Image: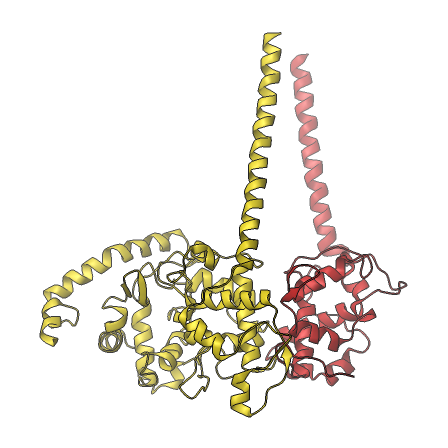
Chain colours: A red, B yellow
Amino acid sequence: MDSLLVYNNKKRRLIKRYLITLLLLLLVFWAHLWSGNPVFYSAISQEPGWAEFKQRYTVSEFGEDGYFVRAVKSGYNLFFHTDRYGWRFTRQSADDAISSCASCHTPEDIAYGFVNADRYDPVLAKRVSFEERVMRCYASPSRLNGFVPTVYDPAIRDLRIFARMVAHKLQLSEGALRAAG
Amino acid sequence: MTRLTGVLLNRWFRLGAVLIVLVVIYLTAQSKHQQRDQLRDAEVVLTQDCADKLGRYNLQPDTRYRSPYVEAQTGAADSLLGYRAEDVRAIQRGCNIIDDLQGEQAVSAAERWNSTRFVRGTQTSCDHCHQGVGDKQDAQGNRQTGSISLGASWVMADMYDRFTGLLLPFELRQMQCFINSSNGFKPNIADDLIRDVTAYSRFLSAALDLKMGNRYPEQGIDELPASGTLKRGDDYVRGETLYQGRCAHCHGAQGLGMVQAGRVLFPAVAGPDAFNLQSRNNFSFVSTILPGFICRNMPKGEEGSLDTQQCRDIAFYISNLPRPAGDRQGPLAAVWQQLMMRAMPGLVGFVDSLNPSSPSSPSSAQSSL
């Protein structure tokens, strides 16, 4: 009798294991093959205004490769549509007054911010990098009201590259100041 | 009852022990943070080269910065955002790190943020490659082509890097230098060591008025492919002869560098203190970088005296000398390289001593005096 019970328990545990494995496999296959969600895509979605922006800032002439231009395009999407492209790091939606970086800044602002970053901030009592400023924007309740991405996240990196590209177009040097007016 | 008390006591004891360990870790972290804060606030004692460089560029706390270098070159300089005292100290520390990574001129290793934690060898320093404290100029103040200027590198950061396949941020590039060129370990991206070097590089780009995203001739290495030669083929034997004639009097007959009174006069190009197999300096990994560096920057004071084929031959020879395995070579290669580094210098020295015509043999050295 006892041995029968042990046998049944063993069998049940085995079936449970197989079921869990099967469920996991199904989830993986569903996510990769049938969900329709792209796992990895090198193409960056094109938002309205990108073509004009690209022309205005001569993005294609910058860098010798498509990688940089793609990162700038991703930065453009993040900058103008943060609620959609940086959704993991913001609680804001398109209906909110502040829903993207562009709600408060222009691309020129961010370029000047970039070349003037890495300076001591008396309020925070420490030297603050451009990346940290962006992180603070994501997390600030009065701004994007969200969460802090890691410094390696494309939500930070692509904004930095976007800022770098605009700074190049404006031919800014380190510490360049905006002309008054 | 006694057993139960024993179990409970045992549990309390274990819990207490864990708590004590956590408190000790917390207090240690607090004390380390305080030490770092104190160091950030401390006056920086500059190395001589840094004092010269930063003095020339008039780095001091002010609301505005105007570069004397740019004024001298063009007659006028833009008024840029100035530096607070905290920024100035970060830039000064960054310069010291570039000039003296090993802390040979520092009172304590903490002055360099204990940078030797990230370096295995005892000789490597950033300015061995990034000469002129990362900003090499001739007597007239002309920046030197292919001199790996840090300021020019900063303005071209985030570009696609063909070796890593990444849009390589400036901080990650520094990490690679630590891992391969210095045969060491990766500092954290937020470590003061990395941040201060970035601050210094950014300051250099301001002082030289380099525009963001522009390619300058002093950025990177002026790479030298085989197509830049008469295509005689790179030759180890020619390379050895050239090395012994032009390089060995500084870097040593076996490339182990020259150290006097604890100061590295000339760095090792082979052996345990040299760059590793995964470094871009390694000819068999990238065949264009070390020849380009040699042609533009070596021998010191006689730059440009070697022709392109000679540079490639020397690079080929140097890269075949034993050196540490890189982070991607695996344990077998690492063990083999260690064996070679330990056994070969003695063996080569012994064989050389048997050959009176060898440049490194004692009899040859005496006859040349």
Split into 4 quadrants, where in the image is the N terminus of chain B?
Answer: top right
**Residue nearest the viewer, comparing A82 with A68:** A82
Name the residue located 70 percent from the left edge and 38 percent from the top edge: A20
Q: Is residue B34 left or right of residue A139?
A: left
List x then y, in percent, for residue B36.
54, 53
Residue B242 image-quadrant placement: bottom left
List x then y, in percent, for residue B187.
51, 57
Q: How many marks?
A: 0
- Taking the view exactly as shown, the residue that stands out farthest to the right is A95
Q: Classify B311 as above or below B48.
A: below
Q: Classify A13 as above or below B253.
A: above
- Taking the view exactly as shown, the residue that stands out farthest to the bottom is B75
Q: Is residue A105 left or right of residue B252?
A: right
**Residue nearest the viewer, comparing B266 with B355:** B266
Residue B318 image-quadrant placement: bottom left
List x then y, in percent, for residue A158.
68, 68
Q: Classify A29 as above or below B161.
A: above
Q: Is residue A35 left or right of residue B316?
A: right
Q: Taking the image as drawn, is residue B90 in sight?
A: yes
List x then y, in percent, for residue A91.
82, 56
Name the residue located 68 percent from the left edge and 40 percent from the top edge: A21
Q: Taking the image as drawn, is residue B270 in sight?
A: no
Residue B192 image-quadrant placement: bottom right
Q: Classify B133 as above or below B226.
A: above
**Residue nearest the viewer, comparing B75 with B217:** B75
Split into 4 quadrants, where in the image is the C terminus of chain B?
Answer: bottom left
